[in-house]
Image (spheres, grey):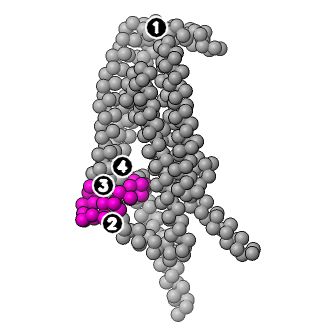
Amino acid sequence: MSANWDSQRIARAALIIAVVLLSAWMLWRFVPALAWACVLAIATWPMRQWLARGELRRTAIAAVLTLLLAFVLVLPLIGLGIQAAHESGAITQWIADVRQNGFGTPQWLAHLPFIGGSVTAWWQANLADPDAARTLLGRAETSGIFSLTRALGVQVANRVTILVFTLLTLFFLYRDGPSVMEAAHTIADRLFGSPGSQLGKHAVAAVRGTVNGLVVVGLAEGVLLGIAYMATGVPHAVLLGLLTAVLATVPFGAPLVFIACALYLLAQSHTAPAIALLIFGTIVAFVADHFVRPMLIGGATRLPFLWVLLGIFGGLESFGLVGLFLGPAIMAVLLAMWREGAEQGTKAAG
């Protein structure tokens, strides 16, 4: 009887593992959408709880929140697409003008230390002369523009598919979230005991803190630096502010934009605005990356700043953009397991 019971348990465990692996293989292409839906649901769950206090049914709550997030996510993409369409016309006109008349050598280029002479010579040979510029730009157009357009179309289609399935999954998470969390809590208790649910709470707190620390702080950096771009006379300040907000979601990402803008102002002989923009951007990025973000992310889970950075950049490299939020969650669970093991070891030694 005992042997028969053991064989049944082994067969059942093997069946569960096989089904889980088969499901993971089948849904592998949709994992980014599922991960994004979980991240967004965790980050906005307080809004769901607030709406649940009223008289709205759970389906209505899920529909309202999903439509709200769809509006927030899709509207900036539409704006970027419209702006990119406008800019593409200007870029095409600029390329045609350069191919016709050449691109004059900036005076400041020769004053660059060490490389000024060689860069100026290359510029005059390949861009300042109309025939050379026509040859260079014509070669670039024929070699890369069609493959770039095709790759861009494939990537846009993939991103749209992920967005659609993310919103669809998000709707069901908002609607059935409480029952899903209750079932997950029960399974975690059966598999890991009481520490299992605690690890889940650490992961949730890390995701929510990371969203606040990366997205909210990144948006704030984009707004502040966008205002600075307008004040210093940088063209396309709104678009550059949006680009800054996107890059600022990664620690130390905002300087890529405002340093480039400062160099542009310096190339236009606007020295004082360039220096002012560089100083203001450095202060904003320094305060955000060294004080605000560690407080929001690390404070939610007691993660040291080094672990926060390792989680963010390690997750970004391993899982892509969604790894920005999954990485700190994994680090939070790992650190919680470490602390629990250390506490148990101390109690056993005592």
Q: Residue drawn 48% across and 38% down?
A: 248
Whole-number angstrom distance, CA of label 1 to CA of label 3: 53 Å
For marks 2 and 4, the one nearer the N-term is: 4
Mark 2–mark 1 Cα distance, whole angstroms, equals: 63 Å
Give the Cα separation between the discs numbered 2 and 4.
Answer: 21 Å
Query: Of callouts 3 and 2, which one flags the residue occurring earlier in the amino acid sequence?
Result: 3
**Helix or strand or loop: what does disc 2 sit on?**
helix
Reply yes or no: does residue 304 show up in magenta: no
Report the residue marked by disc 3. Answer: 65
Image location of residue 97, percent across then percent down: 36, 11
Bounds of the magenta segment: 38-65
Identify the residue at image location x=59%, y=54%: 303
Q: Is residue 131 left or right of residue 280?
A: left
Q: Identify the disc placed on residue 176.
A: 2
Which of marks 3 and 1 precedes in the sequence?
Answer: 3
Secondary structure of residue under mark 3: helix
Residue type at mark 1? Gly
* Residue 14 shows up from this direction: no
Q: Amino acid at mark 2?
A: Asp
Q: Amino acid at mark 3?
A: Leu
**Circle 4 sits on which residue?**
162
Measured in 3D between alpha carbons, the distance from the residue under mark 1 to the one under mark 4, in whole angstroms, is 44 Å
In the image, is residue 345 above or below residue 231?
Answer: below
The percent position of residue 190, horizontal first and vertical second, equals 50, 77
